[in-house]
Image: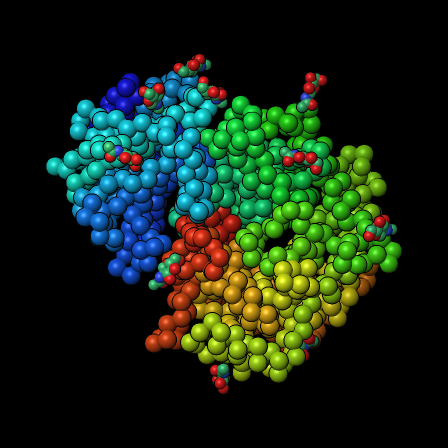
């Protein structure tokens, strides 16, 4: 009982101070309030801790099967959190609404830092967040989950999974001031999570058979746990000196970026992915590179070091996702091991390639990075992942490069450019790159982005790093070999994925697709002025589809990561078809008033296409922020090659498409159409993903949260978008180049 007494003391002292932060922080807390009905998001961080609170409250138009009253507090430390579902006592679904309100406790949130601030024993200090929650009618707390965000996601996104071994250890006790407390000791036997409610006004909370019952009214909630906190990078620490003006110009995005940035890793998103994800942090760092801090203790090195620390030393694979905190102990227990050690997931095949690309961007192309390379490669790994003790960052980077060269070799061999020699997903995995949901790449085994862009770009990067002796003794042979392989992968892979649909068939497919999905806007067949070309999402798909013929945005990888110099006719046609697919409006192309969709299944004849890539599917006809940024930056770079008049060895380096007025104009036009659409969707840009509904009256696509769209058939529940995602903050660095207007 000591613990809640400590908490009560903290609360009353906070009240006295009117919600001031613990005096130990020299700067005021960073806060954000981001409404996104039916969700309401609050962020709070100070020098001690960081927390997000998400309140979900049904709206008059909510689908009550998908949306019910829910409270979540989420913490980056240990990827931890608490979740509580509420139901109205009157039994009328939809009648209970909940909200967080300003009060003497906080505006609306304040930090909890109980236990002595001077204590260096982190297991005895509690950190968390407090505020006031309002119930419009009497309610009961139906499902509490205390511990890991992963455990919460298993319930929220999975088929409502609850583990008795975790749920049954929640204790319910009353508090002396009329409140009630839920407490759970983690499987580590050390950490405890508390979720407390105390009446703020004249309401009351009672305990009935371990269930909390609330009268209508205001309650002070306090969610806290005793687990070591991470060291957050402030906006000034995460941005380079030359970019600190962004803190004033764009406080919301820079605060969100800081919330997701820590000394040992950048986190993928809030609230669902508050931890390390390899692909997310590296794509973000590539796009944010111009504004990110560089040098020792910088954001750039935090990203690269986080990837190297978690690398699989045996085969050079980059870790996709780490499992830490209570869920790690739980997974270990499932494996029959008593341990709190993290687990690392290596199921993705794309993540390996981002590493050398990012290292080249920093250690070769940036002057600060260049000066840091020698020191960085000699840093000893193992601080995060004990498996990598005895290896340096340089050795780990070389193990990764070795893997890539090994996987590249067969296809690069003489007369060996066959589909069988392309990179495939790992056995028994249905996902392997960024479209990592069941129907993301349609069951395909051979992904488009990995084979046509990531592999050759990684090889170019390995060659470039090798020329600077980055891989010590290996460097001399790799410098030439990697470039040789890269040439083959650049020139010979697109053809496997190319899909060309004759004009008349294209019109007919789009028209019938529009009917199939009941699309009520114009079917846009008039914009199909020629045969339609795009590149399949993947090869070797479900339903015996050799090519998964879904038009998509993954062209952006080649535009952003490669300046190919091989076949000029291939490059010209490639530039042209991207431009066509962007400038045409859905259902003929990728453009919508809500942004550029990442997948358009209209040109697939098989009915599975329309059924699986819907506006409710995570990787369906929906909009993700980072492909908008990568496509915009990629097209800008390609157009930039046309103004590049420097010649190498007396030859101009201008690609042929620059001199084809129609194609060059088409690309420039697509670039501006894309930016018009980005500018029109500013309110959505920092979110993970969003969908749309078509409004017949106004003839517009209306941006709509994915979480309120019905999921595609076969999915048990809908995926809720993160309100802030690391790789959706890249418009801090990616801006419109007005010289192409
Ligand atoms: C709550 O307090 C914050 C910070 O002072 C303020 O911005 C916000 O408008 C307040 N909300 C209401 C509903 O008064
Ligand atoms: C920290 O506190 C825990 C629990 O009271 C105790 O078991 C542990 O020995 C302490 N560690 C240190 C370093 O004082
Ligand atoms: C919950 O109650 C049990 C039984 O009284 C006790 O052993 C355990 O320590 C309690 N857990 C917490 C987190 O207080
Ligand atoms: C926690 O304590 C239980 C009961 O003593 C024990 O079975 C379990 O192995 C311990 N877990 C860890 C991670 O030490
Ligand atoms: C208490 O709740 C449990 C689980 O919901 C239920 O099985 C049990 O019957 C309830 N007991 C009483 C006395 O209502
Ligand atoms: C690392 O790679 C090796 C070889 O592929 C594999 O056997 C091992 O399971 C991987 N490690 C982990 C933690 O997955
Ligand atoms: C690191 O080296 C030490 C001393 O040689 C050895 O005891 C230890 O097992 C090594 N650790 C790993 C992870 O290889
Ligand atoms: C060609 O590919 C096959 C596998 O498909 C591989 O065994 C062979 O080594 C490759 N040839 C070269 C020269 O790399
Ligand atoms: C598609 O749009 C065209 C042009 O507006 C129209 O003539 C045609 O009937 C539409 N197709 C269908 C199936 O509605
Ligand atoms: C570019 O696309 C347009 C529209 O589809 C087409 O008419 C033209 O032939 C294409 N040009 C090249 C060089 O591919
Ligand atoms: C391609 O060229 C453009 C224009 O010169 C340049 O901005 C971009 O960085 C280059 N991309 C790569 C991957 O080298
Ligand atoms: C509400 O959601 C459920 C579950 O996805 C779905 O079956 C149902 O059709 C939806 N209701 C409406 C009115 O959209």
Q: Quadrant of the image for the N terminus? A: top left
Determine the image quadrant of residue 123.
top left
* Residue 577 spot, x, y in % from top left: 64, 71
* Residue 350 spot, x, y in % from top left: 64, 48
Classify the position of ligand 10 by quadrant: top left, top right, bottom left or bottom right: bottom right
Determine the image quadrant of residue 683.
bottom left
Q: Where 596 falls versus 462 (above or below)?
A: below
Q: Residue at x 51, y 49 (%)?
A: 727
Nearer the observer, 129 or 259: 129
Q: Quadrant of the image for the C terminus? A: bottom right
Outermost left residue = 202
* Residue 736 spot, x, y in % from top left: 52, 62
* Residue 367 spot, x, y in % from top left: 65, 42
Whether residue 392 is visible, yes or no, is: yes
Q: Residue at x 52, y 79 (%)?
A: 511
Nearer the observer, 467 or 63: 63
Q: Residue at x 52, y 28 (%)?
A: 333
Q: How many marks?
A: 0
């Amino acid at each position: 009982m000591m613990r809640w007494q400590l908490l009560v003391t903290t609360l009353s002292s906070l009240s006295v101070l009117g919600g001031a932060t613990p005096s130990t922080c020299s700067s005021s807390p960073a806060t954000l309030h981001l409404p996104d009905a039916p969700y309401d998001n609050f962020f709070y961080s100070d020098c001690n801790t960081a927390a997000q609170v998400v309140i979900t409250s049904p709206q008059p138009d909510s689908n009550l099967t998908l949306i019910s009253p829910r409270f979540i507090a989420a913490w980056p430390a240990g990827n931890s959190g608490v979740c509580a579902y509420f139901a109205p006592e009157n039994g009328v679904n939809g009648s209970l609404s909940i909200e967080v309100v300003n009060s003497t406790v906080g505006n609306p949130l304040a930090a909890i830092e109980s236990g002595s601030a001077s204590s260096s024993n982190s297991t005895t200090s509690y950190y968390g967040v407090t505020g006031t929650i309002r119930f419009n009618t009497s309610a009961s707390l139906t499902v509490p989950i205390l511990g890991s965000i992963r455990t919460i996601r298993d319930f929220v996104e999975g088929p409502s999974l609850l583990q008795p071994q975790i749920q049954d250890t929640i204790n319910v006790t009353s508090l002396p001031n009329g409140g009630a407390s839920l407490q759970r000791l983690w499987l580590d036997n050390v950490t405890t999570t508390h979720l407390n409610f105390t009446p703020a006004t004249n309401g009351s909370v009672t305990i009935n058979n371990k269930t909390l019952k609330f009268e209508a009214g205001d309650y002070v909630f306090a969610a806290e746990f005793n687990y070591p906190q991470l060291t957050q990078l402030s906006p000034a620490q995460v941005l380079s000196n030359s970019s600190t003006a962004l803190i004033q110009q764009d406080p919301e995005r820079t605060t969100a970026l800081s919330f997701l940035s820590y000394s040992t890793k950048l986190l993928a998103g809030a609230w669902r992915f508050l931890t390390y994800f390899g692909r997310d942090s590296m794509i973000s760092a590539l796009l944010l590179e111009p504004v990110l801090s560089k040098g020792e203790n910088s954001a750039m090195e935090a990203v690269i070091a986080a990837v190297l620390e978690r690398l699989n030393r045996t085969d050079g694979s980059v870790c996709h996702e780490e499992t830490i905190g209570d869920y790690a102990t739980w997974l270990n227990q499932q494996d029959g091991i008593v341990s709190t050690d993290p687990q690392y997931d290596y199921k993705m095949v794309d993540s390996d390639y981002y590493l050398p690309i990012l290292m080249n961007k920093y250690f070769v192309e940036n002057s600060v990075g260049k000066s840091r390379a020698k020191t960085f490669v000699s840093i000893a790994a193992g601080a995060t992942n004990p498996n990598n003790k005895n290896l340096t960052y340089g050795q780990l980077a070389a193990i990764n490069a070795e893997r890539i060269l090994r996987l590249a070799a067969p296809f690069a061999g003489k007369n060996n450019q066959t589909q069988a020699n392309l990179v495939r997903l790992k056995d028994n995995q249905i996902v392997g790159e960024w479209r990592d949901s069941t129907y993301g790449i349609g069951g395909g085994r051979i992904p488009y982005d990995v084979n046509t862009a990531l592999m050759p770009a990684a090889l170019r990067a390995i060659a470039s790093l090798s020329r600077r002796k980055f891989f010590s003794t290996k460097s001399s042979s790799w410098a030439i070999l990697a470039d040789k392989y890269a040439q083959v992968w650049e020139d010979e892979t697109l053809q496997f994925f190319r899909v060309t649909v004759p004009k008349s068939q294209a019109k007919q497919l789009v028209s019938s697709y529009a009917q199939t999905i009941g699309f009520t806007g114009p079917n846009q067949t008039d914009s199909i002025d020629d045969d339609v070309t795009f590149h399949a999402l993947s090869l070797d798909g479900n339903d015996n589809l050799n090519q998964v013929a879904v038009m998509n945005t993954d062209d952006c990888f080649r535009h952003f990561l490669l300046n190919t110099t091989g076949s000029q006719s291939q490059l010209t046609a490639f530039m042209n078809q991207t431009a066509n697919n962007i400038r045409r409006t859905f259902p003929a192309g990728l453009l919508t008033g809500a942004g550029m969709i990442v997948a358009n299944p209209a040109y697939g004849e098989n009915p599975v296409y329309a059924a699986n890539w819907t506006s409710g599917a995570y990787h369906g006809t929906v909009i993700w922020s980072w492909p908008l940024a990568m496509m915009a930056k990629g097209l800008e770079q390609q157009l930039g090659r046309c103004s590049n008049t420097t010649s190498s060895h007396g030859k101009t380096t201008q690609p042929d498409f620059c001199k084809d007025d129609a194609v060059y104009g088409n690309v420039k036009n697509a670039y501006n159409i894309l930016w018009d659409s980005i500018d029109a969707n500013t309110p959505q840009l920092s979110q993970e993903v969003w969908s749309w509904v078509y409004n017949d009256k106004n003839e517009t696509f209306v941006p709509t949260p994915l979480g309120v769209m019905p999921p595609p058939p076969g999915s048990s529940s809908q995926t809720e978008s993160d309100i802030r995602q690391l790789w959706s903050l890249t418009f801090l660095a990616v801006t419109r180049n007005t010289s192409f207007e």
